Amino acid sequence: MSEPLIVMQDVCKRFGPKVVLRGMNLSVEPGESLVVIGGSGTGKSVALKCILGLMTPEKGRVLVGGVEVGKLRGSAMARHRARFGMLFQGGALFDSLSVWRNVSFALTRGDIGRSSRLRAEAIDNLARVGLGAEVADLKPAELSGGMQKRVALARAIAARPEIMFFDEPTTGLDPIMADVINNLIVELVRDLGVTAVTITHDLASARKIADRVAMLYNGRIIWEGPKDRLYMSGNPYVDQFVAGRAEGPIQMAVRRGDVFRNDDGEPAPA
Amino acid sequence: MTPLLRLLIALGTVVIGAFAEIGRVARFAVAALARALAPPFYPRRLAAQLIAVGYFSLPVIGMTALFTGAAIAQQIFVGGSRFNAAATVPAVTVIALVRELGPVMGGLIMAGRVASAMAAELGTMRVTEQIDALTTLRTDPVRYLIVPRLVASTLVMPVLVLITNIIGVAGGWALAVTRLGFNSAEYLSTTRHYLKSDDIVSSMVKAAVFGFIIALMGCYHGFHSKGGAEGVGRATTDAVVSAFVLILASNLIITVLVFGTK
């Protein structure tokens, strides 16, 4: 078995009194597609940002390719981030730039001149996500939510990253558009040969995208296994989550006193 | 715990918080200035900011200067008439405008127009993860977003204040000649006579400092905003209020340094 490409060891992250990650352990093999499921506010996005080096854990280590992310600075951190492409939950397209300039951004680091070659490359990447050249000169605000997600996907793959992160790729989309995005992710991961980590609470998405699924609850990975085992995990937390039941070991954050608390009686993460 | 101790703790918390905030702003400014001196540079971003901050501010700056210059001339004429000093209108108008009103008024108007716009734009980029996206796309957000705004605002404010001064004096001249019975040539000659190089230099220095403060406050509060639409609104308000206070405080310091011993 090959060495894991991404390793999280006992990672803890808090925001003031809010403890979001409390000793998260996770490893991702090269070339696999891992989906991390979990309810809203369980720290899924924070985990991705710790791997990218956008956030620094208070405790624990994040290793990518054997290199500890927390020790990287300057150009080493820039090289680390260059290995990743990320699809943000809301797309995070740059409002002031046209679609093709958004897609070209990773190649030019924002210093975009009038290059017909860059525009042609951007249109090629748009074609990969099923968008035509007619959208190239539009602004993101002129596109539907599904089209924005696809443009964001084209931008994320433009620099041909080694690792792709997908943060809630289907949130806010209708079921058909969500399936279109799922299919695109599967095709891109397969065709480009990347390692993919997707975080979602959309189980249809998880089943379609994943080789392996891990469940994050209360700041820790409480179960992981192949996607075929998701519905027969034997874990009561996973069973409750995939069945979508209100009753079970996972208690929704309820108001006790004047702060929201989770089932451990601690302030619930936002 | 005694009430006095509680009061001291509350005061200490406020003071420590204020110093911590000053430290964070200073660190942010130093980080931006260090990046302004080393490549990569973004000349197109700088040009866009020069146009946004400078060119598009000209109408509001020009109109405000014209009306204020004329109102100053009228007030000095009325006030000066009480002790037979109505003839001082050209001298007092130009000194008041160039030394104080031009830079301060221009600075406050630009704080309202530019610091708020910067804070709102950067704040929206922060809460919609566009700033995180920049980082993942191998682009330093401070270099890409903050440096062009700081440089543009610092460079363009002296030009805007120079224009404010000229239009303000022109407003005073127009009112004095058309309504107060002044001779046009004499008015302009007196204006030139009383205007000294120190006045112009201090006006330009103030303008550059105010331009830096305006962009720094707009960028700092916008860049660090959090908490969705409410957070962006709070960042915008904080940017404008802090820019106002810092402009007025730094104006006093520069005025005392330049004119305090004369």
Image (cartoon, rainbow, N blue to C red):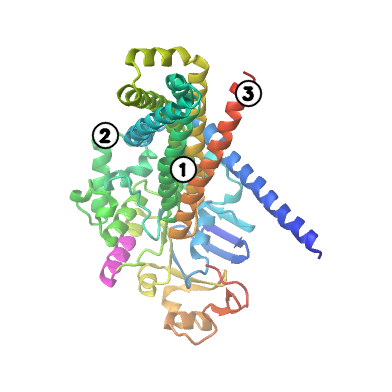
Percent position of residue B11, x then y: 72, 54
Chain letter of mark 1 equals: B
The residue lying at 29 percent from left, 65 percent from top is A183
The residue lying at 35 percent from left, 19 percent from top is B182
In this view, the residue in front, A199 or A185, is: A199
In this view, the residue in front, A36 or B156, is: B156
Quadrant holding the N terminus of chain B = bottom right
> Which residues are drawn in magenta?
A174-187
Percent position of residue A141, x then y: 28, 54
Q: Which residue is mark 1?
A: B141
Q: CA distance from mark 2 to mark 3?
A: 53 Å
Q: Amino acid at mark 3?
A: Gly
| Mark 3 and mark 1 on one chain | yes
Q: Quadrant of residue B139?
A: top left
Furthest residue toward left? A134
Quadrant holding the C terminus of chain B = top right
Q: In the rendered view, would you say B236 is above or below B2?
A: above
Q: Which mark is residue B260?
A: 3
Label 3 sits on a secondary structure element that is loop
Q: Is residue B117 visible?
A: yes
Q: Is residue B6 left or right of residue B147?
A: right
**For the residues carrying marks 2 and 1, which lies nearer the camera in this image?**
1
Give yes or no for contact between labels 2 and 3 (Cβ–Cβ under 8 Å).
Answer: no
Pointer 2 local density, CA inside 10 Å: few below 14, some 14–19, many at least 20: few
Percent position of residue B119, x then y: 45, 47
Q: Quadrant of residue B53?
A: top left
Q: Count of labels shown?
A: 3
Q: Which residue is mark 2?
A: A114
- Is residue A59 found inside the magenta-colored segment of the image? no
